[in-house]
Image (cartoon, rainbow, N blue to C red):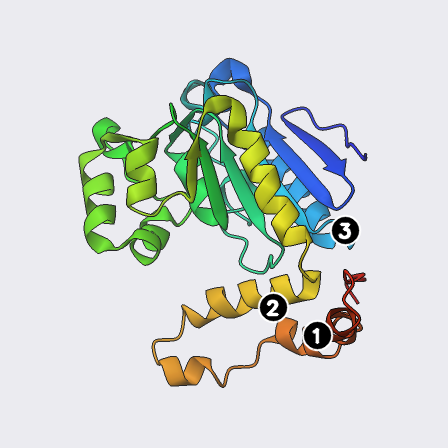
Amino acid sequence: MRNFAYRHCLYETEGPLLVLTLNRPQVLNALHPDAHRELADAFDRYAADPGLRVCIVTGAGDRAFCVGTDLKELAATGDHAKPSTGFAGITHRFDLWKPLIAAVNGHCLGGGMEILAACDIGVASRSAKFGLPEPRVGLAALGGGLLQRLPRQIGTKDAMALVLTGASISADEAKRIGLLNDVVPAESVMARARQYAADILACAPLAVQASKQIMLQSLAVANLQETMHENYPAAVRMLGSNDAIEGPLAFAEKRRPNWSGQ
């Protein structure tokens, strides 16, 4: 296990798995500029470390995943600063092809929704609540691209209902509209997230990264035929890798593949 001495997040590795925990439970894991900067550095480390293949993002305590911006801190300092990679160092990061799994263990509001939408897979406790309360305090959810992501992820009508009313919804409703993959009892959130991580880790890492790159980059191209002729560097890397040889060989030899990520 490798740990880094962050103050506002916990960076804990378990072999190829990173568990990154927002660690401000005293304010329901609301984030301020120092926390944003730490998380940006943590995601930089994850992206650069060839030994890490999957990341689970969660919140400390059992009350909240993240309730967005620390408004008391903002009122005291007036400091809106965020890194170039966006809210929590992740919402404006468009070149991270390693998977991200959100393990939502409580309230997921405002910026917490931004983090969830920036992740690839979402698991939540049955008691979790989701919402974008910004319009109820005279603001809009401008910070992390959620207004752009939501219509693409869950459809325009459900996105409009969630954004324009500022209302909170249950975990079951969040799953119904496509914000989540699974809703489980609170004590099972991390176990379900770890199961997703284990299933991903059973696959070739370069194949996983190529698949994510192709899916996300193709969303930016309106013409379906054009997406099939785009150049996807992660796919080129995958096809030229040792793992592309190892996979079929292991299948033929009826054994588990030994992925090298090269």
- Could you tell me how far apart the alpha carbons at marks 2 and 3 are, in whole angstroms? 17 Å
Residue beneath the point at 35% across and 81% down: 223
Residue closer to the observer: 192 or 25? 192
Q: Can you identify the residue that label 2 sits on?
A: 210
Instruction: Locate residue 210, reporting x and y percent.
Output: 60, 68
Q: Quadrant of residue 111?
A: top left
Residue beneath the point at 34% across and 48% down: 178
Q: Does dot 2 land on a helix, a strand or a loop? A: helix
Q: Earlier in the sequence, mark 2 or mark 3?
A: 3
Q: Does dot 3 land on a helix, a strand or a loop? A: loop
The amino acid type, in three-letter code, at marker 1 is Arg
Q: Can you identify the residue that label 3 sits on?
A: 49
Q: Number of callouts in the render?
A: 3
At label 3, counting other C-alpha atoms closer than 10 Å, the crowd grade (few under 14, some 14-19, many 20 or more) is few
Q: Does dot 1 land on a helix, a strand or a loop? A: helix
Instruction: Locate residue 208, reporting x and y percent.
Output: 62, 62
Q: Earlier in the sequence, mark 1 or mark 3?
A: 3
The amino acid type, in three-letter code, at marker 2 is Ala
At label 2, counting other C-alpha atoms closer than 10 Å, the crowd grade (few under 14, some 14-19, many 20 or more) is many
Q: Can you identify the residue that label 1 sits on?
A: 237
**Given this view, does label 2 or label 3 mark the residue nearer the observer?**
2
Vertical relation: 117 (above or below) 138: below
Residue closer to the observer: 12 or 196? 196
Contact, CB < 8 Å: mark 2 with mark 1? yes
Rendered-image quadrant of the C terminus: bottom right
